[in-house]
Image (spheres, rainbow, N blue to C red):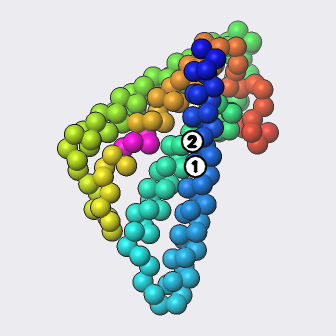
Amino acid sequence: MNVISKIYDGLIYGLACLAGLVLAAIFIIVLADAIMRDMLISPPSWSDPSKEYGLLYITMFCAPWLVRTRGHVLLELMRQRLSPGGALILERGVYIVCIAICLVLSWHAMSLFAGAWTSGEEDHRGIEIPLTFLYGPPALAFPLMTIEFARYLFGKDSIYEGGTVGGESV
């Protein structure tokens, strides 16, 4: 079990690092596009779709890590006004709702990915990209987010306690 846990942790942190690399690549592409336009040179046709796909990849690749590290936005106002027992019930309810939403989105993303895989369809925006590249990141990220929320539901950690990456809460 320890080996599986280490592989899973590596996947979560690896995807977050990959999201950072994609962000750096988008920065370089945007900078190159701006310089080329200033020099009256037409940027390559692949630059716009690659930036669009990159934003999707960044969002999907860092989302499980953000759930794990409590780096996302959450609202504590109502929870703070409840008794400890009421706050725990609300907290567990939030986990259940988040798990349910992620399960539905997982199923939908996996269905889209499987359909794109079997059909071999392509996206034709500037360049031809298989639709599996569009549906793959959500099909990976939503099941991972489901697992992360389930870790909070069945574990001892709380998404509301223990600090956040940025040290802030709302």
Residue at (70%, 29%) from the top-left corner?
76
Direction from residue 74 to residue 56 in the image, left or right: left
Q: How far from the left and from the top, in percent, is residue 83?
A: 74, 13
Q: Are marks 2 and 1 in contact (CB under 8 Å)?
A: yes
Q: Is residue 137 magenta?
A: yes
Taking the view exactly as shown, the residue that stands out farthest to the front is 3
Residue at (45%, 87%) from the top-left corner?
41
Quarter of the image for the N terminus: give it. Answer: top right
Q: Main secondary structure of the magenta part?
A: helix
Residue at (76%, 42%) from the top-left corner?
166
Label disc, if present, on residue 15 of the rendered structure: 2
Instruction: Examine the rendered structure and indicate whether residue 23 appears above or below residue 91.
Output: below
Q: How far from the left and from the top, in percent, is residue 158?
A: 70, 21
Quarter of the image for the C terminus: give it. Answer: top right
Label disc, if present, on residue 19 of the rendered structure: 1
Taking the view exactly as shown, the residue that stands out farthest to the bottom is 40
- Callout 2 crowding tier (Cα within 10 Å): few <14, some 14–19, many ≥20: many
**Which range is magenta?**
134-138
Instruction: Report the amino acid beneath label 2.
Output: Leu
Residue at (32%, 39%) from the top-left corner?
113
Is residue 92 at least partly visible in the picture?
Answer: no
Which of the 4 image quadrants contains residue 46?
A: bottom left
Residue 140 or residue 168, whichever sits in front: 140
